[in-house]
Amino acid sequence: MGTARATLAGAGTQTAGLGFGGNAPPSRNLTEEYNGTSWSGGGNLGSGRYELAGCGTQTAGLAFGGATPATGATEEYDGSTWGPGGNLTTARFALAGAGTQTAGLAFGGQTPSVTGATEEYDGSAWTSGGTLNTVRFVLAGAGTQTAGLAFGGNTPPISTNTTATEEYDGSTWTAGGSLNTARRILGGAGTQTSALAFGGFIGAPVANTEAYNGTSWTAQTVLSTARNGLGGAGTQTAGLAFGGDAPPNTAVTEEWNDPTLAVQTITTS
């Protein structure tokens, strides 16, 4: 990346990624776009913030929440410029996100008290959804608005990491298979039934990577650079990890490729 930073947000795919916001320090409004090989500058966010969440694609991204201090600000990206969207009902930071620019999902975070509140975005406004069963912040997310996934994070009291995974059906969160390693400030990518969790913090930055199949998590090859507060994008078989705190803050980008995790259909005659 052009600027080393942590607690940034990500969106997009492995060959068309988007990284925005973060703490360098201070908080940054920078946006960078990834083409599968290198990063280049994009349009700046309207406000510098860190511990924000994001979703969508490189040309239709969504940024929401964050610390400047706690904000409900939402911005929409068109591939070159960020414009204002409808504010979150609950201003917060250290939250997670999933979905698309016109069907986004925000959950967890701090207000500054820890919350399990979930909100759904329709492209213009946020409305309340079902509350997380495990209230937490600095968690990771994946999936869509009607098939979301929340995993890891920190629960009250503040020092307690969790392995809890929850699945969202568009109205209610239910328990899924637990992570093998409890951690916070981790990265995530993929879908509800094919997710990837990487990095995080357990007293120090870690490189742990795990894959979710809709039922359970399985340990995978670790990141080359252990870190927390990193951005994530892509899929379970073509993931992207960037930035974070190693420490110090890093600009390192890593690509995850594992065809053995892909779903394959075999037709017999």
Image (cartoon, rainbow, N blue to C red):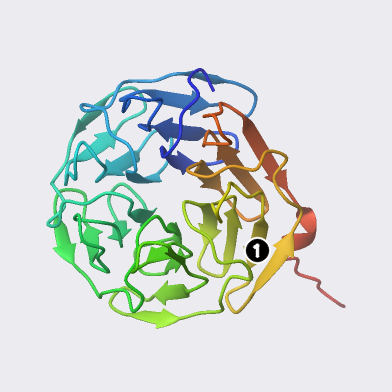
Place of residue 23 in the rendered image (x, y in percent of width and height, measured from the top left): 38, 31
Q: Which residue is mark 1?
A: 211
Residue 147 to residue 43: above or below: below
| x and y, in percent, of residue 78 in the image | 31, 30
| Residue at 72% in and 64% down | 219
Image location of residue 136, percent across then percent down = 35, 66
Under mark 1, the amino acid is Ala
Quadrant of the frame with the N terminus: top right
Would residue 262 be seen by someone viewing this image from the given angle?
no
Position of residue 108 in the picture relative to residue 68 (left or right)? right
Residue appearing at x 36%, y 45% in the figure:
54
x, y (%) of residue 6?
45, 35
Question: The residue tagged with tag 1: helix, strand or loop?
Answer: strand
Position of 208 relative to 51 (above/below): below
Question: Residue 80, can we see it?
Answer: yes
Q: Quadrant of the C terminus?
A: bottom right
